[in-house]
């Protein structure tokens, strides 16, 4: 059984894809549906055939942005070909990441609970 000389290679490739895609989207993508996008994570299949790219938004419509990013996936992949030094550049699949949104909702719930408890304790 042959062991890979670089066991973290997949993570390194995913990290490089994330950095390069961030730059490509910010500098070269002109689609009006794609605004201020933050790439949160990239998951690459072991054979590098596909990459799930998780993104969040400061403002805008997640579905429209995902449509814009997925429509530009071929253009972005071509940009990655020029930057990455790997044999196979993955097909990109953009997915809206609701983690930030859920965290904000959770913080709001906690704040309401704390305010409600403080109000109850303040009343006789």
Image: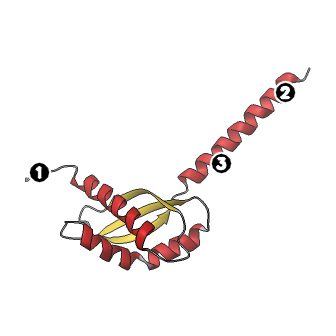
Residue shown at 92% from the left, 20% from the top: 124
Residue at 75% across / 38% down in the picture?
112
Q: Which residue is mark 2?
A: 120
As drawn, the label of residue 5 is 1
Work out whether mark 3 precedes mark 1 in sequence or the reverse, and give the earlier one.
1
Looking at the image, the residue that sits furthest to the top is 124
Q: Check residue 88 in the rendering and tell me which mark sits there, or answer none.
A: none
Residue at figure coordinates x 78%, y 33% from the top left: 115
Badge 1 element = loop
- Label 1 close to label 2 by CB (< 8 Å): no
Q: Say few, some or many: other residues with alpha carbon within 10 Å of mark 2 (under 14 / 14 to 19 / 20 or more).
A: few
Q: Earlier in the sequence, mark 1 or mark 2?
A: 1
Where is mark 3, residue-wise? 105
Task: Specify the color scheme.
Answer: secondary structure
Q: Marks 3/1: CA distance? A: 43 Å
Residue 5 location in percent, x, y?
A: 11, 51
- Residue that extends furthest to the left in the rendered view of this protein: 1
Q: Going 64% across and 44% down the picture, which residue do you hit?
A: 106
In this view, which residue lies farthest toward the front?
27
Q: Residues within 10 Å of mark 1 (few under 14, many from 20)?
A: few
Label 3 crowd (10 A; few <14 / some 14-19 / many >=20): few
The local secondary structure at tag 2 comes to helix
Whether residue 89 appears in this view of the structure is no
CA gap between label 2 and label 3 equals 23 Å
Q: CA distance from mark 1 to mark 2?
A: 61 Å
30 left or right, relative to 23: right
Task: Please report contact status of discs 3 and 1: CB closer than 8 Å, yes or no.
Answer: no
């Amino acid at each position: 059984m042959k062991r890979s000389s670089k066991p973290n290679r997949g993570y390194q490739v995913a990290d490089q894809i994330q950095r390069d895609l961030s730059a490509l989207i910010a500098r070269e993508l002109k689609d009006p549906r794609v605004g201020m996008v933050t790439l949160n994570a990239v998951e690459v299949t072991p054979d590098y055939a596909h990459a799930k790219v998780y993104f969040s938004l400061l403002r805008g419509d997640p579905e429209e942005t995902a449509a814009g990013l997925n429509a530009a996936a071929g253009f972005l992949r071509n940009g990655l070909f020029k930057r990455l030094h790997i044999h196979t550049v993955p097909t990109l699949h953009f997915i809206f990441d609701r983690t930030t949104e859920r965290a904000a909702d959770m913080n709001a719930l906690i704040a309401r609970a704390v305010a409600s408890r403080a109000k109850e304790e303040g009343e006789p």
